[in-house]
Image (cartoon, grey):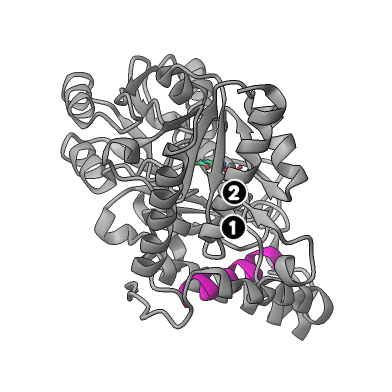
Amino acid sequence: MTTKESQGELHPGDRVRSLFPFFTEGPGGCYLDSAATTQKPAVVIDCLRDVLVNHNANVHRGAYRLSAHATELYDQARVKIARMIGAKSERSIVFVRGTTEAINLVAYGCELLFNPGDVILLSLLEHHSNIVPWQLLAKRRGLTIAFTEITATGELDIADYRAKVAALKPKMVAITQLANSLGTVTPIQEVVEIARNAGAMTLVDGAQGITHLGVDVESLGCDFYAFSGHKMYGPTGIGVLYGRPERLEAMQPFQGGGDMISYVSVEGSGWAEVPQRFEAGTPAFPEAIALGAAADFLTRFSKTEVHHHEVELVGFALETLRGEPGVTLYGPATNGGHQTSVCSFSLDTVHPHDFATIADTFNVQVRAGNHCAMPALRKLGVQATIRMSFGVYSSKADVVSVVTAIREARRIFGR
Ligand code: PMP
């Protein structure tokens, strides 16, 4: 299976809002927190409803038609996901709850492949979910964790990365494709290549990358790629771990239970083939099927056009905010670097949390805090930022509303 760049039957911009009931029937407004979770198009909501109304029967179990059909839809969703990310086989697709569970699954599943003293190399840009599972593993197995440095504007320091790979010979490299805190696009192809040449396993956190950049896992060459449905216009409670078949084969089960076994006896049990080995219990099959609808939706856009739209919004936000007194901007694009879908900033006299509350009175939703990326923010010398994050439905008018809120906040809190 290979991914084909869609010609873009749908185009990002505020006209696409008509496809999202959140904007047409719900609260709407300037929703600028898509990095936390995206709004859902009607095709996803309708698909979820359709499964629950018309096709609801447990998968892999019943001998009756309803269950067989639900299983068929679930299997089709796996194929759609494999196709979207360019995986050779749907056997590489494990349905999980989200990125966090995917990374925990790998950290646990690979546990016995690690020996005391082995090194896991991360970066200071990582979301906590790509740090803490490794710390837990390191504690269990006596491993060392090292972090690749970032520059003053939050770019991955590739020279430091190269040096650490050469010096530390990590067994696992786990790095994000796109940082949720700053919008940093990492040179992920180079990162994976350097790691592979040094014999390391690679995991790419694609929680943001899948939506804003897309991926072809075969040409990227990573061992694992993790993402969440709810950040790619799909449902919550469903996500994906892509793993190379030979890597998945070498992993121990993460959870035991129904559906992940080939047999169970009082003496012991045997494991099912991958990917079922990692899908114990009843899966979130309606959500998985609706994730397939989200994949169909996303692939109706041209990746290039989505990227262009979101980079342009970042550029517009920086340009607009630069002219505002009291604003400090963060991220690679402040210095000509590669950044997309996120604009992080702070204000001189207003705490990010206070700003988010004031912005809300203008029906502008922004995120305030450390964005589950405390090491990155600490490195930049801030505890919290205000973050606007964009999706296909975002527009320059949203950014202009943030400026109105900034002026009001600075009027209230003093300039
Ligand atoms: N990694 C990144 C880069 C993220 O942005 C997020 C969510 N903010 C996660 C991992 C965790 O995703 P989830 O909460 O859906 O498991």
Contact? badges 1 and 2 (CB < 8 Å): yes
Relative to 196, 216 lies left or right:
right
Q: Quick one: quadrant of the C terminus?
A: top right
Looking at the image, residue 41 sits to the left or right of residue 21; the answer is left
Q: Which residue is mark 1?
A: 229
Please state the horizontal and vertical placement of residue 164, each as a whole percent of the image: 22, 22
The percent coordinates of residue 127 (x first, y second) are 50, 33
User: Which quadrant of the frame does ligand 1 lie within?
Assistant: top right
Of helix, strand and loop, which one carries label 2? loop
- Closest to the observer, 132 or 70: 132
Above or below, 178 against 383 in this view is below
Q: Residue at x 17, y 27 (%)?
A: 159
- 31, 159: nearer the viewer: 31
Give whichever of discs 1 and 2 has the lower sequence position. Answer: 2
Q: Amino acid at mark 1?
A: Gly
**Which image quadrant is residue 376 in?**
top left
Q: Is mark 1 within 8 Å of ligand 1?
A: no
User: CA–CA distance between discs 1 and 2?
Assistant: 7 Å
Asked if residue 190 is among those painted magenta in the image, a careful observer would answer: no
Q: Name the side, left or right, on which 49 lies relative to 297.
A: right
Q: Secondary structure at mark 1?
A: helix
Q: Is residue 273 something that shows in the picture?
A: no
Magenta stretch prevailing secondary structure: helix
User: What residue is pinned by disc 2?
Assistant: 98
> Residue at image x 54%, y 34%?
129
Q: Is residue 17 above or below residue 396?
A: below
In the image, what residue type sits under mark 2? Gly
Which stretch is magenta? 286-300
Within 8 Å of ligand 1, the CB of disc 2? yes
Q: Position of residue 170 (x, y in %)?
A: 28, 26
Residue visible at 40% across and 17% down in the picture: 143
